[in-house]
Amino acid sequence: MDELTCLLAKNFKYTTPVLAVQESKLRGTALLASKVYHYLASPQDMKTHVLNILALREKEGILDRPLIIWEPAPLSCRPENLEACLETAALVDVFSPNHLELAAFFGQSPVASDRSEIERLGENLLACGVGPEGKGAVVIRAGENGCFVQSRITSQWLPPFYRANMGKEQPAKVVDPTGAGNAFLGGYAIGYLQRKGDILEAACYGSVAASFALEQVGMPEKSNEGGEELWNGESVVRRLHEYRARQEFCCSRW
């Protein structure tokens, strides 16, 4: 096991009760008109959330569809929930398990370093239909392997910002992976909106957001310098440009 993989290994448990999501709380607030909703939920609960938020928005005259991102609750990722998972995936725009959760749904052992197996399982999900009219995306977050982004029209591996072969200095900045998946999907949402629905661009934003979440226990420190937003003292925009520059596909895109 390489140094970066060791750093990313963790034990996690909730220390406080998980707050229940209640769409009714959004009634009468600006959040009801949000362009993106990101949920962490079981397949059964997620189906209810989607139906509730869309019905509530329609009732309030908000007819445009938001981007709905589903991150499956880890404890719900079991073979007995696979059918419910596939049914719910058809209702969301982005289905994003990590590689361990993906394997668990299919009753398989972890596939941490087997890219071909991750791709195969992702293709199985996509073949069953993700998103309305099958136009959604599967984004598999795979730790030190980065992420695999897949839709009906494209598929692409993107590396993590911090990689094991980058020398000692950068991997040493990886302190705690807790919350990196959530940060990834938050960054993905921003990138999706700013780059007009390009899922590969969105994943670049997500990878950069996750890199800041890895650098400490807890939240990154936000500051401003000369009107520019900094996280942990570094420019988010510059890090995004640096990350893009590493990708072979970006040469013809940016």
Image (cartoon, rainbow, N blue to C red):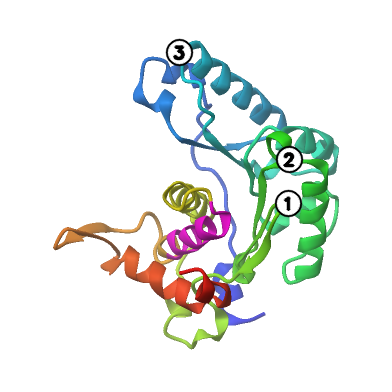
Three-letter amino acid code at the position of disc 2: Gly
Closest to the observer: 244 or 141?
A: 244
Span colored in magenta = 198-211
Closest to the observer: 251 or 12?
A: 251
SS label for mark 3:
loop
Residue 20's x, y, as percent?
53, 26
Three-letter amino acid code at the position of disc 3: Glu
Label 1 Cα crowd, 10 Å radius (few <14 / some 14-19 / many 20+): some
The numbered disc on residue 60 is 3
Three-letter amino acid code at the position of disc 1: Arg
Report if residue 221 lies within the magenta region: no
The numbered disc on residue 134 is 2
Drawn side of residue 187 relative to residue 95, left or right? left
Task: Give whichever of discs 1 and 3 has the lower sequence position.
Answer: 3
Task: Identify the residue under disc 1.
Answer: 152
Drawn side of residue 9 relative to residue 63, left or right? right
Residue 251's x, y, as percent?
51, 76
Q: State yes or no: discs 2 and 1 in contact (Cβ < 8 Å).
A: yes
